[in-house]
Amino acid sequence: MRIAMAAPEMAPLAKVGGLGDVLGALPAALEKLGHEVSVVLPFYRQVAQNETVPIRPTVHVVTVPIGTRKVWARVHRATLPDSGVEVYLIDCPEYYDRPEIYGTGGRDYKDNAERFVFLCRAAVELWRLLELSPDVIHVHDWPTGLIPVYVAEMYRPRYGCFDRTVTVLTIHNLAYQGQFWHWDMVLTGLDWQLFHWQKLEFQGHLNFLKAAIVYADGITTVSRTYAREILTPEYGHGLDAVLRSRADRLWGIINGVDYRIWNPATDPHIPCRYGPETVREGKRACKAALQQELGLEVRADRPLIAQIGRLDPQKGWDLVQSVAEQLLERGVQYVALGTGQTQYEQWLRALACEHPGQVAALIRFDEPMAHRIEAGADMFLMPSRFEPCGLNQLYSLKYGTVPIVRAVGGLADTVTDTTDETLANGTATGFVFREYEPEALLAAVDRALRCYRDAACWWQIVRNGMIQDWSWERTAREYERVYEELRRVRADQATVVSTET
Ligand code: ADP
């Protein structure tokens, strides 16, 4: 199949969170299965400044009407490392030559509607210009959400292109919907008739993600449990009813891990490499080096608990905040790496000041440090309110860092709680709690700490996690099945239409 993707992030060129990791791996995994995959991405300042992936110019220029203006962009090209995946980079400095991808200081850029309307239409325009005729157009999250609308409402009827193409939306996080002032409709060039409750409008606003949910032929999200959860008011972020109306075309496909990047046996960022057979010595060395680097007491017997992620309420920081003192009274060390909301940054900094040698707060984005923490910590905490998939618990499993997670979304699908039964049958990989309550979190940590003091039990859990396989190949096959199913449905519909006429 010829698969054309569009996305707002793609590692290693531009990454804010898990979406970037997915785009850095899924296209190459699909290519390995024999498909031709390309990706459209904005030419952000980070992309221009990156030193790992060479950028090549092309002769192409795309011109897109934005409201009453015509905006144009040069198109550059890059090839995803270790693959043949082509990346088309939309170079429009007025939108993308900025310090960050979505905004600074926790605030979105005010013209995000315009920046991503442009991306959507430029992507479709480019595919037309290149005469790409993709079998599948696969878009990711709200910034590319208008693409299925442009395909169905503008490019198919107006230019007769994309006739055989199916469109797929992947929802990486339903909380981010791209909801804007209704007058931003003017920027899209789409007919105002589409601005109604069954199409682009949501509660009086233009909603990019809702538009994609309505228009895409198929919808996927990044775990089975999250696919069920988002159909409920509790986790639906207001869009549960719209999603329920498309439930027959909704699939949950768990993300994979790029083991070329996240593997303690080959990781260039960690001081000592190890695998399941050498995990004890390997982790001992990595832990001592991490404690030293972070200014923590260098003691092998102190359990070191880690947390990495956006400083956002989604990730359960307030829950940790409410039990932090009780946790520290248990003699554990704690390291947090993250950036985001000021209130959490201040709290973490203060906690580190009050507990020197026991707490380290790293308020920055630091990928190599994320690797060293994964290798050096004993336990990894993810008490999320909701979690579409979550990648850090999967990295933790591979690094022998036992995850302590709340049973939501992808966390519920990837971590098996430790019980007598799961210990006996070799499936225990972590500690899971249900309620979003301080007591529930503490009880899970206490269970983990009891187990930590029983070496035989602990290293069994560590090994169970390390030998699991969450590679992309399996995930890519599931996407392949979804694409094929949607193409079959489309072909059937075309047959029905042609026999009727
Ligand atoms: P989300 O996509 O909701 O942010 P995920 O767990 O799916 O969460 O993915 C987060 C990704 O971003 C992981 O690769 C994680 O290591 C990385 N990450 C998040 N914050 C930081 C940070 N401050 N420094 C380094 N890496 C980070």
Image (cartoon, rainbow, N blue to C red):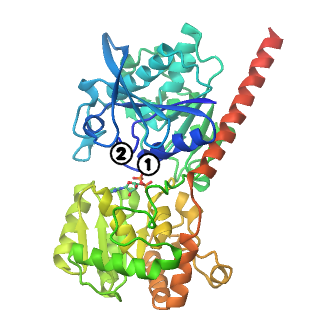
Q: Quadrant of the N terminus?
A: top right
Q: Please state if 278 lies on the left or on the right of 96 as rendered.
A: right
Residue 50 image point, x, y percent: 28, 40
Q: Amino acid at mark 2?
A: Lys
Q: Is residue 291 above or below residue 217?
A: below
- Mark 2 beta carbon near ligand 1 (under 8 Å): yes
The answer to the question of whether label 2 and label 1 lie on touching residues, with beta carbons closer than 8 A, is yes
Residue lying at 54% horizontally and 58% vertically, measured from the top left: 410
Q: Please state if 490 lies on the left or on the right of 167 as rendered.
A: right
Distance, label 2 to label 1, CA atoms, is 7 Å
Instruction: Label 1: state its secondary structure.
Output: helix
Q: Which residue is mark 1?
A: 21
Residue lying at 47% horizontally and 64% vertically, measured from the top left: 393
Which residue appears farthest toward the left when viewing the image? 353
Quarter holding residue 311: bottom left
Query: Which of 199/344 is in front?
Result: 344
Density class for disc 2 (Cα within 10 Å; few <14, some 14-19, many ≥20) is many
Q: Amino acid at mark 1?
A: Asp
Mark number displayed over residue 15: 2
Mark number displayed over residue 156: none
Disc with the residue nearer the chain's start (2 vs 1): 2
Residue lying at 47% horizontally and 57% vertically, measured from the top left: 390
